[in-house]
């Protein structure tokens, strides 16, 4: 639930290097085996999804990341998703548009794009990361090859401690709505953050009423299609910000969360019932530790 602070990104040269290493690893491996990726100078296209309070094309965030990647990887096609008809709508939709509808809109946009036919890598920032995971689970065509989640909230959030930039008045309003009833139909339908609100003290309400997160996290029924599609990813990389003051709890960025029934102790993905029972993916554990080493 934070927009990526571009200063952190650009000045964090270690982080930039690490992310580029993931992006670059793809094309190098592919050149040998697969003639499908001959367009774009042999590179795999990249799809970006921005975070809350941000837009596809903000020159200080997504715009500069797109530009940086285009400069680093010669010929690469980068699509920064815009949900809505313009930048203003895109930003508003990040607060108020039904997430399932946003994911379908993204899926059709990806399916229509001739540049993506042979597959693509995806990189989501903050809430954009869990939205892209939903794309991977629901829309296997065109194929997503690698998913990089930068500060994503894969187990949702329980708290909204701080809001990025100029959106703080919107966040005050959102906080009120969440407190008054995150799982009521009205709030669920119209508030993006309610759709990944995860109240550990009201697990049953969450499982029953969360329109988005409980569905993609297989809390109500196990959808074999979701499992199968997620495992089609070559790599699922989750980047956690060790000093994040926007996301609560920060463990969610590595798919951990608060233990059910209380709001203090956390558990890792591997300790969670979700992992033990549903096997989110064996793909994650190795890469978590790798990323942790690179960023600490
Ligand atoms: C293709 O990649 C090579 C090597 O990275 C680079 O020198 C060349 O300029 C690129 N061509 C295009 C059209 O981007
Ligand atoms: C499982 O997911 C697929 C893809 O989104 C969907 O078409 C199907 O209806 C889902 N099945 C269940 C039981 O939810």
Image (cartoon, helix red, strand yellow):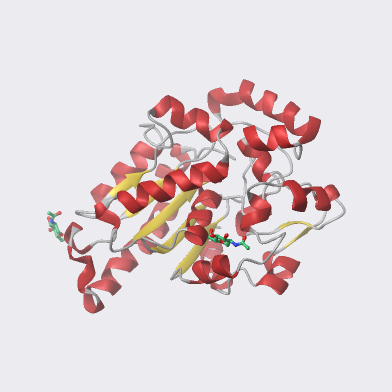
Q: Residue furthest bottom?
A: 33
Q: Nearer the viewer, residue 80 or 101?
A: 101
Please state the horizontal and vertical placement of residue 256, each as a whole percent of the image. 69, 59
Q: Nearer the viewer, residue 291 or 276?
A: 276
270 displayed left or right of 260? left
143 displayed left or right of 157? left
Please state the horizontal and vertical placement of residue 156, each as a whole percent of the image. 67, 49
- Quarter of image, res 163: top right
The quarter of the picture where the C terminus appears is bottom right
201 displayed left or right of 42? right
Q: Residue furthest top?
A: 169
Please state the horizontal and vertical placement of residue 50, each as a whole percent of the image. 46, 41
Q: Nearer the viewer, residue 295 or 132?
A: 132
Residue at point 73%, 29% (across, down) = 177
Question: Which quarter of the rendered image does ligand 2 occupy?
Answer: bottom right
Residue at point 78%, 46% (across, down) = 199
Looking at the image, how many numbered discs can be counted on the residues?
0
The quarter of the picture where the N terminus appears is top right
Please state the horizontal and vertical placement of residue 215, each as a whole percent of the image. 65, 55
Residue at point 46%, 71% (across, down) = 232
Q: Is residue 60 something that shows in the picture?
A: yes
- Quarter of image, res 6: top left
Q: Is residue 32 above or below residue 116?
A: below
Q: Is residue 285 above or below residue 132?
A: below
């Amino acid at each position: 639930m934070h927009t990526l602070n571009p200063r952190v990104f650009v000045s964090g040269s270690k982080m930039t290097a690490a992310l580029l290493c993931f992006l670059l690893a793809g094309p190098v491996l592919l050149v040998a085996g697969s003639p499908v990726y001959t367009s774009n100078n042999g590179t795999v296209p990249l799809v970006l999804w921005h975070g809350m309070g941000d837009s596809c094309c903000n020159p200080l965030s997504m715009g500069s990341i797109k530009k940086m990647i285009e400069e680093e990887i010669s010929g690469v096609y980068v699509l920064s998703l815009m949900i809505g008809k313009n930048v203003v709508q895109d930003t508003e939709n990040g607060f108020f548009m039904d997430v399932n509808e946003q994911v379908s809109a993204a899926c059709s946009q990806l399916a229509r794009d001739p540049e993506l036919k042979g597959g693509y890598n995806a990189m989501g920032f903050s809430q954009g990361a869990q939205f892209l995971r939903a794309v991977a689970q629901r829309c296997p065509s065109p194929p997503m090859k690698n998913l990089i989640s930068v500060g994503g909230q894969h187990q949702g959030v329980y708290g909204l401690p701080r809001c990025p930039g100029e959106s703080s008045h919107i966040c005050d309003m959102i906080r009120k709505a969440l407190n008054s009833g995150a799982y009521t139909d009205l709030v669920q339908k119209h508030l993006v953050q309610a759709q990944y609100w995860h109240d550990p003290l009201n697990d049953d309400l969450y499982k029953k009423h969360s329109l988005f997160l409980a569905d993609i996290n297989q809390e109500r029924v196990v959808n074999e299609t979701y499992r199968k599609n997620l495992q089609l990813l070559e790599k699922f990389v989750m980047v956690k910000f060790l000093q994040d003051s926007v996301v609560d709890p920060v463990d969610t960025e590595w798919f951990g969360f608060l233990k059910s029934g209380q709001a203090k102790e956390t558990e890792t993905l591997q300790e969670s019932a979700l992992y033990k029972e549903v096997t989110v993916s064996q793909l994650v554990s190795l890469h978590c530790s790798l990323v942790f080493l690179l960023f600490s």
